[in-house]
Amino acid sequence: MSETETTQPADHDSPWKMALEGYFQEFLDLLFPAIHEQVDWSKGYSFLDKELQQITADASSGRRYADKLIKVFARDGSETWVLIHVEVQGEPEAAFAERMYTYQYRLRDRYGVDVVSLAVLADTRDSFRPTTFRYQRWGCELTFTFPTAKLIDWESRWSELEASDNVFALVVMAQIHAKRLKDGATRKDFKVALIRLLYERGYSRDQVVQLFIIIDWMLQLPSALEPEFVQAVYAIQEEKHMPYVNTIERYERAKAVHEGVEGTLRKQIALKFGELPVWADERIASASDAQLDDWVAQILTADSLEALLGKH
């Protein structure tokens, strides 16, 4: 394994979902401040996962997105649903704006509420900045426009992120470098610096642990560099007298969860398709947590092993 390779494909969608669930108000405050000001935060907010699943259940692209749907209340007392799309794929998607519109009209048609669609673009292609879906034919025309936040725009405002007391600044910093830094040693050094910053900001124990998990999930390291990272974290915790995170236990728990999901998938395949061929065994053994989760969810509707795991 080369220095730049990680132990498994990076899964950016899961940490984004965790970050949005834990810090939705801070997310809006940092990336969409004008919208943050329009929300009556005293009335709280709630996540509508089931409602979002209802309108995305037929998605067949196979791609994963960190989409979240949240119910908030505007300052005038009206109920509004905020639909957040986080595009974290390596390559921009040509049909992204159309998908934004599709989810928008499905939600409005099904539930009859105002829906505000927001897009977070975490890719590194500067020219990819979709803001509008438009079509017209024979005098019939539709234009759908949505606000976006391009994370690499913060690279020129890096000092603001470092100085910000908004916890979501750490998430943005981690995501940008997760895309930018390919060299394993450089990635490790930045990850350690980010963890140090996390411990220096005076957060509660629970916040430190949750943000640590998010940052750790986003900035995966080559396995050869993991021991150095673990020792650096221990040194920071000892220096700050904050033994919040047991990194060794963390790796053991993550491994146990991965092996559990993998075992479940193998049993499901054996029951439905019979003995596992070599190519499928190898594909499962090298799969990421996110891919295993997808296959477990899709096996009920898959009509063949090839359709489930992809052609070999």
Image (spheres, grey):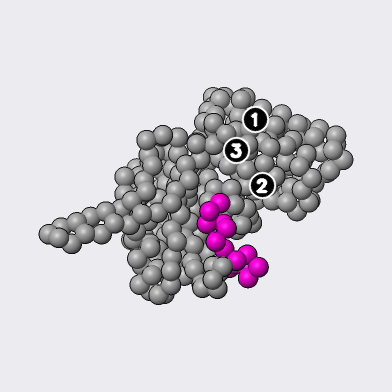
Q: Residue at x 61, y 25 (%)?
A: 186
* Residue 104 point in image, percent of width and height: 38, 63
What kind of residue is marked 2? Asn
Q: Quadrant of the N terminus?
A: top right
Q: Residues within 10 Å of mark 1 (few under 14, many from 20)?
A: some
Tell me how far mark 1 sits from mark 2, CA to CA. 19 Å
Of circles 3 and 1, which is in front?
A: 3
Which residue is painted at 62% across and 47% down in the image?
168
Q: Is residue 102 above or below residue 114?
A: above
Where residue 289 appears, as percent x and y from the top left, is 54, 49
**Residue 110: x and y, percent?**
38, 74
**Which type of secondary structure does the marked residue at label 1 adopt?**
helix
Position above or below: 258 against 240 = below
- Amino acid at the residue labelled 3: Met
- Residue on which the image places disc 2: 166
Contact flag, marks 3 and 1 (Cβ < 8 Å): no
Observer-side mark, 1 or 2, equals: 2
Judging from the image, what secondary structure is the residue with disc 3 in? helix
Q: Secondary structure at mark 2?
A: loop
Mark 3 vs mark 1: which is more N-terminal? Answer: 3
Return the disc, 3 or 2, that comes first in the chain's sequence: 2
The first of marks 1 and 2 along the sequence is 2
Which residue sits at x=51%, y=40%?
A: 151
Location of mark 1 (residue): 190
Looking at this view, is 36 or 149 the one in front?
36
Contact, mark 1 vs mark 2 (Cβ under 8 Å): no
Residue at horizontal 62%, vertical 53%? 26
Nearest the eye: 93 or 120: 120
Label 3, label 2: how far apart the Cα atoms are: 12 Å
The residues colored magenta run 33-48
Pointer 3 residue: 173
